[in-house]
């Protein structure tokens, strides 16, 4: 970091401010970064942003020196920095991820609502004839639309994206196939009495809430009317299946996120690929209890299994059974 900072403050700032890149046979600082410094396009762009922001706001350099801001953070903050808000914004963005900084900026300057719409994406000419045209769905907005610009094929293949709009609102975008489109059409028609304006966002919100309730019931045994209490004295059992009451209690206690804590006290905040992990491997203890089970993400669960049983043993187990090592604990 110190080497990078030295290069930023002494070389790039000087080259950019005095246009010394022209003497190097480059038409711009961007070209200089690529041809002379051999940076990739994305790196060159981010470093130029950081250099120019540091030239106007010395506090940026200090934040970099202390390791409080990364290049992407500076690029997001740079257009918003002024003499009046520089210290405040840098302090608010300290040690935050790019997504957290986008949320911070969106909350400070909320953007307007995006129109609710579903549209058919352009397809390659070779398959266009075989694909039926799909009419647009609109909810609570006029049917007429401006001409849609062609969407690159690479963009169509990207996964769904979420962008913060501020004031606890988000723009959600994803690509649906024809089957999902027809389901949305049918659901929108059936729910007209409940959602008169046919707003897709309202319909999807209800559908997600219903699915989430079902998934929580399956994963964590959540229910409004639990049937049984947790056994008072755990005893050895023959089944790996953890009782619903214990799964429910463990998920509530652990906050539905990984409980792994590093040596310096940092807790893993992952909510994805969560698994129930026995503190003492079930293979040895054959006991299910609230105190003896924690939530771990798959990566930390596998790490624990490899520490307990060894790398070679777990690799043999995976080859023999086809199961991941996490299922062994």
Image (cartoon, helix red, strand yellow):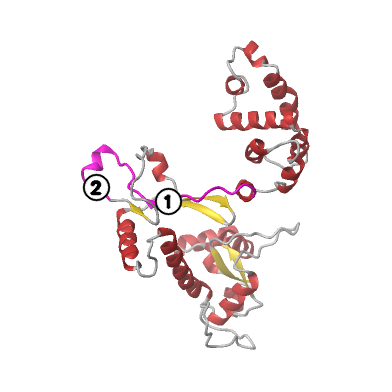
Marks 2,1: beta carbons within 8 A: no
Q: Is residue 131 magenta?
A: yes
Describe the element under mark 1 as helix, strand or loop: loop
Residue 226 visible in this rendered orientation of the protein: yes
Q: Nearer the viewer, residue 144 or 316?
A: 144
- How far from the left and from the top, in percent, is residue 303? 61, 60
Q: Nearer the viewer, residue 281 or 97?
A: 97
Q: Main secondary structure of the magenta part?
A: loop
| Residue numbers of the magenta segment | 108-134
Residue at image point 63% right, 69% down:
255
Q: Nearer the viewer, residue 83 or 52?
A: 83
Describe the element under mark 2 as helix, strand or loop: loop
What number is the disc on residue 174?
Answer: 1
Q: Which residue is mark 2?
A: 131
Looking at the rendered image, the quarter that the C terminus falls into is bottom right
Residue at image point 46% right, 72% down:
214
Q: Quadrant of residue 98?
A: top right
Left or right of 317 in this view: 203: left
Left or right of 212 in this view: 307: right
Looking at the rendered image, the quarter that the N terminus falls into is top right
Position above or below: 286 against 328: below
- How far from the left and from the top, in percent, is residue 47? 64, 30
């Amino acid at each position: 970091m110190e080497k990078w900072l030295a290069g930023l403050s002494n070389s790039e700032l000087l080259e950019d401010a005095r246009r010394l890149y022209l003497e190097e046979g480059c038409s711009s600082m961007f070209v200089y970064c690529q041809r002379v410094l051999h940076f990739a396009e994305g790196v060159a762009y981010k470093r130029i942003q950081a250099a120019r922001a540091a030239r106007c706001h010395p506090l940026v350099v200090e934040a970099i020196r202390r390791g409080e801001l990364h290049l992407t953070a500076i690029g997001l903050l740079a257009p918003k920095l002024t003499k009046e808000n520089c210290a405040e914004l840098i302090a608010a963005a300290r040690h935050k991820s790019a997504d957290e900084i986008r949320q911070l900026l969106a909350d400070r300057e909320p953007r307007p609502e995006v129109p609710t719409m579903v549209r058919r994406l352009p397809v390659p000419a070779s398959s266009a004839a075989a694909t039926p045209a799909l009419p647009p769905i609109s909810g609570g907005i006029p049917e007429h639309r401006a001409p849609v610009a062609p969407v690159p094929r690479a963009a169509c293949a990207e996964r769904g994206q979420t962008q913060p709009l501020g004031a606890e609102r988000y723009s959600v975008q994803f690509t649906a196939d024809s089957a999902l489109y027809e389901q949305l059409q049918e659901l929108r028609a059936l729910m007209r009495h409940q959602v008169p304006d046919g707003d897709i966002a309202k319909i999807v919100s209800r559908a997600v809430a219903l699915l989430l309730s079902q998934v929580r019931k399956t994963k964590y045994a959540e229910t409004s009317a639990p049937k049984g209490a947790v056994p008072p004295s755990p005893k050895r059992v023959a089944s790996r299946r953890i009782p619903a009451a214990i799964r429910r209690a463990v998920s509530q206690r652990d906050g539905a996120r990984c409980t792994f804590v590093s040596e310096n006290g940092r807790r893993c905040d992952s909510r994805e690929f969560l698994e129930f992990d026995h503190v003492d491997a079930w293979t040895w203890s054959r006991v299910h209890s609230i105190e003896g089970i924690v939530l771990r993400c798959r990566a930390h669960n596998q790490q624990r299994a490899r520490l307990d049983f060894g790398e070679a043993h777990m690799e043999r187990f995976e080859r023999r059974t086809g199961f991941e090592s996490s299922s062994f604990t």
